[in-house]
Image (spheres, rainbow, N blue to C red):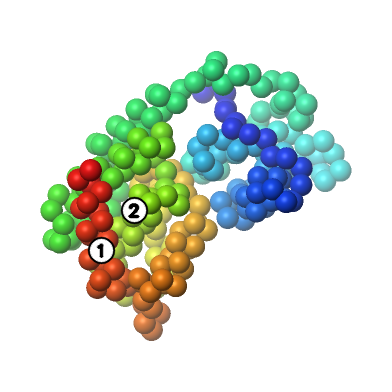
């Protein structure tokens, strides 16, 4: 309520991944994560992309001195004013030990994945499945492991996150077998990403399209007349992996 946290300040340059114009720098956050194109992303935050600090050039123009703002993807990219200029922002930083809420945040996310209500779409998809016993429980078990390992509820490129990408696709296409690539990308956020109580409050659309295209290249997802589906073997493997990971 009274502060934001940063994990780093992006360096000037283009070569290193986390430099301002690097492959994970400001243009990436604006183009791939959907942050407003009003300035420059200068700091990343502990949420792994779900909020950032930006220089805001809307009032000063390209030649003026920008304000510093916080942008929260999980709250529909809400903008909060932080400082009138970069120097004031830097001078206002304090050690994160003064505001360490990581344990409380982790406990809240563990509660969320344990008992939080599924989104209407996710609940509906789970109710249509007969191949997996106690499916909801197993999804919660895997997501609990994700929170325990990361300290927060978010999917990235790790093994368990990839499993959850696969599970969501398998669930959706099992109920809606005529799904196209764009239809799936459009509906993805309604399952877990913005899934209400059992949800993450945000995601990077580029990561989902990259995952989907990767599965197509691997031959695990096939495309026929614009319709996507797992191969029978790939679908069986998703179920087996979910069962195995939930049992750990």
Which residue is situated farthest in the right direction here? Answer: 63
- How packed is label 1: few (under 14 Cα within 10 Å), some, or many (20 or more)? some
Residue behind mark 2? 164
Task: Inspect this view and state whether residue 58 appears.
Answer: no
Q: In the image as oriented, which residue stretches furthest toward the top?
A: 98
Residue found at x 73% / y 51%: 15
Along the polypeptide, which appears first: circle 1 or circle 2? 2
Residue 211 spot, x, y in % from top left: 44, 61
Image x and y of residue 26, in percent: 67, 48
Q: Residue 177's image quarter? A: bottom left
Q: Residue at x 81, y 44 (%)?
A: 61
Q: Is residue 35 left or right of residue 182?
A: right
Q: Residue at x 78, y 26 (%)?
A: 87
Q: Looking at the image, which residue is at 28% across and 45% down?
A: 142
Residue that badge 1 annotates: 237
Does residue 216 appear left or right of residue 42 in this picture?
left
Tell me the CA gap for discs 1 and 2: 13 Å
* Looking at the image, residue 78 lies above or below residue 227: above
């Amino acid at each position: 309520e009274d502060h934001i946290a940063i994990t780093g300040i992006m360096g000037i340059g283009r070569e290193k991944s986390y430099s301002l114009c690097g492959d994970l720098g400001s243009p990436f956050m604006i183009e791939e994560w959907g942050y407003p194109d009003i300035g420059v992303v200068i700091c990343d935050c502990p949420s792994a992309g779900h909020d950032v600090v930006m220089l805001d050039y809307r009032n000063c123009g390209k030649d003026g001195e920008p304000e510093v703002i916080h942008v929260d993807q999980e709250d529909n990219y809400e903008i909060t004013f932080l400082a009138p200029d970069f120097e004031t922002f830097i001078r206002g930083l304090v050690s994160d030990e003064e505001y360490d809420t990581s344990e409380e945040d982790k406990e809240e996310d563990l509660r969320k994945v344990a008992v939080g209500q599924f989104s209407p779409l996710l609940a509906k998809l789970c109710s249509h499945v007969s191949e997996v016993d106690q499916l909801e429980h197993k999804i919660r078990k895997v997501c609990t492991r994700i929170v325990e390992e990361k300290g927060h509820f978010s999917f990235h490129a790790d093994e368990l996150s990839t499993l959850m990408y696969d599970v969501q696709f398998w669930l959706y296409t099992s109920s809606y077998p005529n799904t196209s690539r764009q239809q799936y990308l459009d509906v993805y956020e309604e399952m877990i990403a913005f899934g209400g109580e059992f949800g993450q409050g945000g995601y990077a659309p580029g990561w989902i399209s990259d995952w989907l295209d990767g599965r197509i290249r691997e031959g695990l997802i096939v495309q026929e007349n614009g319709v996507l589906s797992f191969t029978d073997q790939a679908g069986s493997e998703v179920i087996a992996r979910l069962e195995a990971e939930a049992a750990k």
